[in-house]
Image: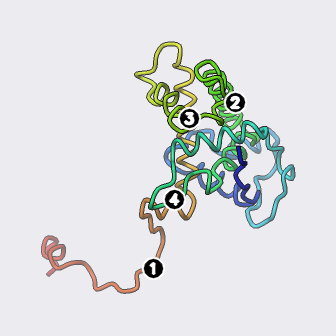
Amino acid sequence: MEQPKRISRRESIKWVVAASATASLLSTRGFGANAAAHGYGQDPKLLETYKPGDLWPLTLTKEQRGTVAVLCDVIIPADDKSPSASQLGVQDFIDEWISAPYSAQQEDRKTILAGLSWLDSESKKRFKKTFADLSEDLRRQICDDICFEPKAKPGMKKAAQFFNRFRDLTTGGFYTTPEGMKDIQYLGNVPLTKFDGPPPEVLAYLKLA
């Protein structure tokens, strides 16, 4: 399987910080929240350029990273509006996220690594191949069994919890990229080129016209 191209370390760090602020990833133990308490030092300076290992070692193996990229694309495939998640390097964001030395990210690391191992075990049991080597249709057959925890079979509850968290991380990473924001037509803080004031019906409703 061809390995997706890596994005820069600086970009992935920026995504980690941005995605930690999105609604799907919010918690009381957000990125960097416990840095001072546990002696991790200062959080990354986002204007700096970092190389692997400058901040913390990345923990995904080559094989795990390939599986992450494939699963990212099951969740967000390419379409006529935007590239796939792996084409935007979301697998690098996830690697950076679960490698960070913060308590919330370390908990996610346990969940993600256990889930990746389960995917390969289940794939070999059903189809005699690793998850990354399966066809798109076969990958979806496995994911359909774990994509909704309330309906997952008793023996697949843990796998469904993994999929739920992985999906949150994938969408959090994807929709904090420029391409992802464009996909949902999020403009952000963009100045208007022309503004003629509130519509007449609004002014009339407020009795200002």
- Residue ID for mark 1: 191
Q: In this view, does 189 lie above or below 166?
A: below
The x, y position of residue 204, in whole percent, is: 13, 75
Q: Which of marks 1 and 2 is nearer the N terminus?
A: 2
Question: Residue drawn 55% across and 64% down?
Answer: 178
Q: Earlier in the sequence, mark 4 or mark 3?
A: 3
| Left or right relative to 47: residue 175 | left
- Residue ID for mark 4: 180
Q: Residues within 10 Å of mark 3 (few under 14, many from 20)?
A: some
Amino acid, disc 4: Gly
Q: Residues within 10 Å of mark 4 (few under 14, many from 20)?
A: many
| Left or right relative to 93: residue 180 | left
* Total marks placed: 4
Q: Residues within 10 Å of mark 1 (few under 14, many from 20)?
A: few
Amino acid, disc 3: Arg
Distance Cα–Cα, label 3 vs label 2: 12 Å
Q: In this view, does 73 lie above or below 128?
A: below
* Secondary structure of residue under mark 4: helix
Q: Are marks 3 and 1 in contact (CB under 8 Å)?
A: no
Q: Which of marks 3 and 1 is nearer the N terminus?
A: 3
Q: Which of marks 3 and 2 is nearer the N terminus?
A: 2
Viewer-proximal residue, 186 or 87? 87
The x, y position of residue 26, in whole percent, is: 54, 43
* Secondary structure of residue under mark 1: loop
What's the mark number on residue 113?
2
Q: Are marks 1 and 4 in contact (CB under 8 Å)?
A: no
Front: mark 3 or 1: 3
Distance Cα–Cα, label 3 vs label 1: 35 Å
Distance Cα–Cα, label 1 vs label 4: 20 Å
- Residue ID for mark 3: 165
Screen quadrant of the C terminus = bottom left
